[in-house]
Amino acid sequence: MTRITYILIVAVAIATLTQCTVNDCPQEVEIPLDNICVGDIAFRRGEGITSTIVLYKDAEGQYSHVGVVAMSDSGLVVVHAVPGDGPHQEGIDIVRAEHLNHFFAPDKATKGEIMRLALDSAQQNAINRYALEKARQQIEFDHQYDLGDTTRLYCTELLYLAFAHAGIDINEGRISNLYVPGKQYDLIMPSDIHKNANLKTIFIF
């Protein structure tokens, strides 16, 4: 088999595996907005390169990205630090606030879950203020994954700090070790938060 023939076979196989029909393409998820509260945690699983890497390294994890629900002037939003993953990225890598339906859009989420920790109003307000302020500031995404540097934030770090602002250790001290050639990262993975036994599932798809 020639190299060109091999490449063509692989290309056809990939096209066959990735194409979808009207019936099996991901459909927009209907979020039960009336049952969503400030401080709820939104997990999603994506298909982009960054998502694939996170899921590969986070062997115990189901999700590759996470954000926190806040109440903005325009209604409920998910505040999250996004690394511009995939072909549908919008703008630079920053902390942003977007509608839940946008966060869980079919081109961004193949799987998702909203979970809740019992919070009082003061804790909700503290988390809400912190998250919206970081989105307003458009804090840049932390590609160094450095928990000691709060001038830039990655997704789980944003959650960690938002809940810490309300006096809550959302990852319960869990830190994961990520090894790449020449460097080790000590960081919070989505599963480190998802494992919190006090979280209750509100919605899942």
Image (cartoon, rainbow, N blue to C red):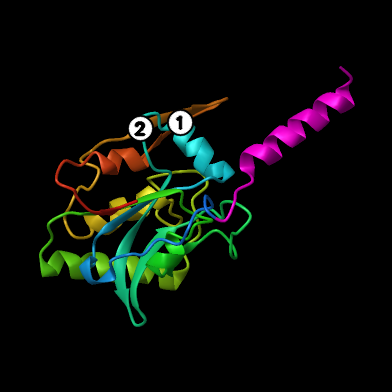
- Counting other residues with Cα less than 10 Å from the Cα at mark 1, is it few (<14), some (14-19), or many (20 or more)? some
Q: Residue 191, image x and y in percent?
A: 32, 38
Cα distance, mark 2 to mark 1? 10 Å
Q: Residue at (47%, 60%) from the top-left corner? A: 105
Element under disc 2: strand
* Quarter of the image where one finds residue 190: top left
Q: Main secondary structure of the magenta part?
A: helix
| Relative to 93, 134 lies left or right | left
Near-viewer residue (121 or 26): 26
Near-viewer residue (67 or 141): 67
Q: Amino acid at mark 2?
A: Ser
Q: Residue 176, image x and y in percent?
A: 35, 32
Near-viewer residue (8 or 49): 8
Q: Amino acid at mark 1?
A: Lys
Which residue lies most toward the front here? 23
Sequence-wise, the earlier of marks 2 and 1 is 1
Q: Residue at (56%, 46%) from the top-left corner? A: 48
Q: Residue at (23%, 59%) from the top-left corner? A: 165
| Residue 2 painted magenta | yes
Element under disc 1: helix
Q: Is residue 62 above or below residue 127?
A: above
| Residue 155 painted magenta | no
Residue extent of the magenta highlight: 1-22
Which residue lies most toward the bottom here? 73
Residue identifier under label 2: 176
Q: Residue at (41%, 32%) from the top-left corner? A: 58
- Residue 9 visible in the snapshot: yes
- Residue 114 visible in the snapshot: no
Residue identifier under label 1: 57
| Relative to 88, 29 lies left or right | left
Marks 2/1 in contact by CB < 8 Å: the verdict is yes
